[in-house]
Amino acid sequence: MHCANDLLKKSLSPANANCIWRTDRSYFYPTETPGVSPGCINVSPCWFQQDNADVSFCPEISASLKGPQGISIIKSMRRPSLLASAALRVMHPSLYWASLHTTLEIGHWAYSNGQTEMFERIRHWASVFTGVTVMANHWSPAHHNPKCCPEWFDIMTLVGNYPSARMKLHNLGIELVYDSGVMVAFCGRLVRHEVDLQTGDRWVWAWFMRDSVHNHFKMPRGEHSLYSEADYAKYSKVEDILNGM
């Protein structure tokens, strides 16, 4: 977070400035940790500005990774990158392999087309996800992520020093524990979610993929994650126990 502090500080727009809520200053609160500012940045070694994947456009690295600080930011994210990738390998194997092939194809394309800066970034990129939103002390209203495919999972990883928190999943009618160290995965396009916490210090890495990137490199999306019959049997036993309490 310290490596990205200058970018976080510059990311915020004036409150109520008719900008998107993700960078509207009114959705952030001050940090207590020295050297880390509230903010929200997108980090990706390969994406399309405005998600425009027309044939006349070439993929590029996100603004956060341009310049000498780009490699430092990627290297500082290695551990959370590997943890999120390992979790996806367990939770959604087909998406994991499709995304791994995509990141490898990005590296091959960047090298073959003389995209030196992109190649250097993807060479140090330790995640199968093609992007991550880094947020510091950001509370979010109920929303969904329309650029996520229905078959895909977004993964949120959290660290910090803050009171016990809950993530509300409105159309599922449930709440999840959202404490430091928790990792949450679901399809952000289908599940409307909200986190309303404005105390303490909370830093979130929201790992995501863009359909435009997979399509550009002609990579598969990955199928839906499905429960096996054995999983259903285990769930039924737990449900019977809970209903009997």
Image (tube, rainbow, N blue to C red):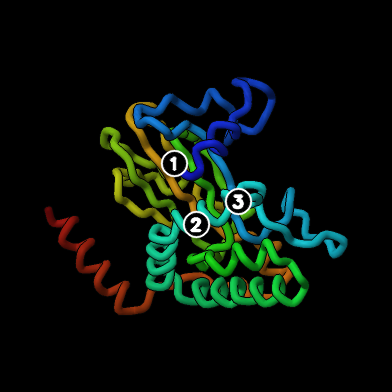
Question: Nearer the N terminus, badge 3 or badge 1?
Answer: 1
Please give the residue where the numbered disc 2 appears in the rendered image: 154
Residue 186 in view of the camera: no
Residue 83 in view of the camera: yes
The three-letter code of the residue at mark 1 reads His
Look at the numbered disc 3 and give the secondary structure of its residue.
loop
Q: Position of residue 138 (x, y in %)?
A: 46, 34
The three-letter code of the residue at mark 3 reads Pro
Q: Residue furthest left?
A: 245
Look at the numbered disc 1 and give the secondary structure of its residue.
loop
Question: Left or right: 212 with respect to 71?
Answer: right
Q: Position of residue 204 (x, y in %)?
A: 43, 45
In this rendering, the label closer to the viewer, 2 or 3: 3
- Residue ID at (29%, 43%): 179
Please give the residue where the numbered disc 3 appears in the rendered image: 68
User: Which part of the image, by quadrant, shows the N terminus?
Assistant: top left
Q: Position of residue 224 (x, y in %)?
A: 52, 70
Q: Nearer the viewer, residue 137 or 235?
A: 137
**Figure check: 130 above or below 139:** below
Please give the residue where the numbered disc 1 appears in the rendered image: 2
Q: Position of residue 56 (x, y in %)?
A: 87, 61
The three-letter code of the residue at mark 2 reads Asp
Q: Determine the image quadrant of residue 185.
A: bottom left
**Figure check: 94 above or below 176:** below
As measured in the structure, the alpha-carbon distance from the residue carrying label 1 to the one carrying label 2 is 24 Å
Mark 2 closeness class: few <14, some 14–19, many ≥20 residues within 10 Å: many
Question: Left or right: 11 with respect to 231?
Answer: right
Q: Nearer the viewer, residue 69 or 173?
A: 69
Q: Residue furthest right?
A: 56
In this rendering, the label closer to the viewer, 1 or 2: 1
Question: Nearer the N terminus, badge 2 or badge 3?
Answer: 3
